[in-house]
Structures are given as C-alpha cells and as structure tokens.
Amino acid sequence: MSDQVILETRNLCKVFRAGKSEVRAVDDLSVSIAAGSFTALTGPSGCGKTTLLSLLGALDRPSSGQVFFLGRELSRYSDVELARLRRRMGFVFQNFSLIAGLPVWDNITYPLIPRGVGRRERRDIAAQMLARFGLDDKADRSPSELSGGEQQRVALARALAGQPDIILADEPISNLDPVNSAAVMSCLQQIHAEGKTVVLSVHEPAIAPPGSRVISMAGGRIQREEIR
Ligand SMILES: Nc1ncnc2c1ncn2[C@@H]1O[C@H](COP(=O)(O)OP(=O)(O)OP(=O)(O)O)[C@@H](O)[C@H]1O
Ligand SMILES: [Mg+2]
C-alpha cells in the first residue's frame, strides 16, 4: 500500500436548512484516505455517512471546508474536469439505482456510452464483469428478476466497469442476508486486493475485513477510529 493520499477533507461542513432549523450533517470533519486503503464508515442512522460519501465523490458541494482529490481542491475543478474526475470514481448507492427497463449487461455498461465505447465492446466488458461476480447467466435478465444480493453485485459491476481508482459504496450490504452480504463483501475485498481504494458505509463494522480502517461517526464528526 502506498502512502499517497487520494482523498482528503479539511474542516469539511455540510449544513442542511429546513425552515428555521439546521442540521450539521458533516461538521468540521478532517480526514485523509490513503490510496489503496479500505475504509469503513460506521455510526448511527443520521450521523452523516451518506453525506460524507457524496462530498468525497463530488456529487455534492460542501457548505464550507474543502475536499482534495490527489492534492487538488475540488472547488478548483471546472465542470468538465469534475465530470472527468467522477469517471475515476465508482459509486454504489444504497438503493442500487439500477434501471428497470434495461437488461443487466446494459445496466453495467451504459455509463461507458458517453465515453464512446461501442455496443460490442460494452457487451464484452459486461460479460467479464458478470463472470467475475458469479452472474454469468444473468446478462439478459431485467434487474427486477434478480435477488437483492445479485442486484447489489450488478451495481458493483457497474461501478467497476469504468475502471475507477476508487470505489465509494453506501451501505452495499444493507438489506442483504448473511450469504449475499458475504458475497458482496468478498467482491469488495477482491477489488481492494487489486489495488483500488475502497470507502464504504456500513451499519455493522464487524463485517469490515481484517486490516481495514473503521471510522465511527456521530453527529457529523469522527468520534473514533481503529484498525480492525
Ligand atoms: N437533503 C437533505 N436535507 C435536509 N437534511 C438532510 C438532507 N440529507 C441529509 N440530511 C440530514 O443530515 C443528517 C445526516 O444524514 P445522512 O444521510 O448523511 O446520514 P447517514 O449516516 O447516512 O444515515 P443512515 O445510516 O440512516 O443512512 C441527518 O440528520 C439527515 O436528516
Ligand atoms: Mg446513509
């Protein structure tokens, strides 16, 4: 593992206002994520995990403070540069966000269309990803015909199809049974073993693999952290 920092936040704040009340979803949070590391964010519902992941992934803008990708602050990126940056990141959302009307292979590779990857090559890439996640026979299925664990693996396959440097996964095993959870976690460990940086949120930190960094959040802040 290198000591290079791929993502860093400094005094990061995200404040949501609803009428007179305000929520400090992320509150003065500073953290560095080393390239090639495996980090699990944990903490009670509402502690800011999803908000932090969206800020790290440049899907949302901070209220104050900064996020750096390889040392460069995100607010200094132009829109075109931000779009290019997001291609280096793979997202897995809590609700899978698969598209119902598209077969599995297309769900995995449609993000490659704007990059000029043709249909045939996309089918090949999808086939490789499906083989790797044990879903060889599912390419032409609709997402609704898959189990929750299978859908979650398709979402991971899509996140990886563009060969990102970093995977950001928001509760990738929530709502999965133990067998499917283990399958998805083992996919994530495999991705990490190939040198990618993995940051995920989990309700149950015990599932984080040995050697991973577990960051416990509360009220938008880091409460403590440990190496498992
Ligand atoms: N768009 C929004 N508008 C207003 N408040 C928001 C918004 N998004 C999040 N919040 C609030 O910010 C806080 C952090 O939310 P966040 O979704 O980051 O928590 P979380 O740790 O991911 O929770 P969970 O474990 O339930 O997914 C919560 O109090 C939430 O209600
Ligand atoms: Mg969340």
Image (tube, rainbow, N blue to C red):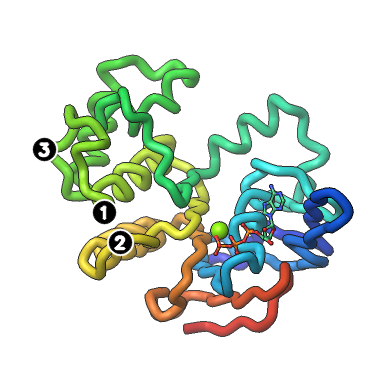
Labels 1 and 2: the sequence-earlier one: 1
Depth check, front residue: 193 or 189: 189
In the rendered image, the vertical position of residue 210 relative to residue 54, given as above or below: below
In the rendered image, the vertical position of residue 124 relative to residue 57, given as above or below: above
Alpha carbons under labels 2 and 3: distance apart: 21 Å
In the rendered image, the vertical position of residue 161 relative to residue 201, given as above or below: above
- Identify the element where label 1 is drawn: helix
- Identify the element where label 2 is drawn: loop
**Which mark identifies residue 182?**
none
> Which amino acid lies under the numbered mark 2 shown in the image of this protein?
Leu
Q: In this view, does 177 lie to the left or right of 71?
A: left
Q: What residue would you read off at disc 1? A: 149
Q: Position of residue 104 (x, y in %)?
A: 26, 32
Q: Where is residue 10 in the image (x, y as percent from the top left)?
A: 81, 62
Mark 2 Cα-neighbour bin, 10 Å: few <14, some 14–19, many ≥20: some
> Which image quadrant shows ligand 1?
bottom right
Q: Where is residue 216 in the image (x, y as percent from the top left)?
A: 60, 77
**Which mark identifies residue 176?**
2
The answer to whether one can see residue 129 in this image is yes
In the rendered image, the vertical position of residue 177 relative to residue 154, given as above or below: below
Q: What residue would you read off at disc 3? A: 137
Residue at 63%, 30% in the rendered image: 83
Mark 3 Cα-neighbour bin, 10 Å: few <14, some 14–19, many ≥20: few
> Which amino acid lies under the numbered mark 3 shown in the image of this protein?
Asp
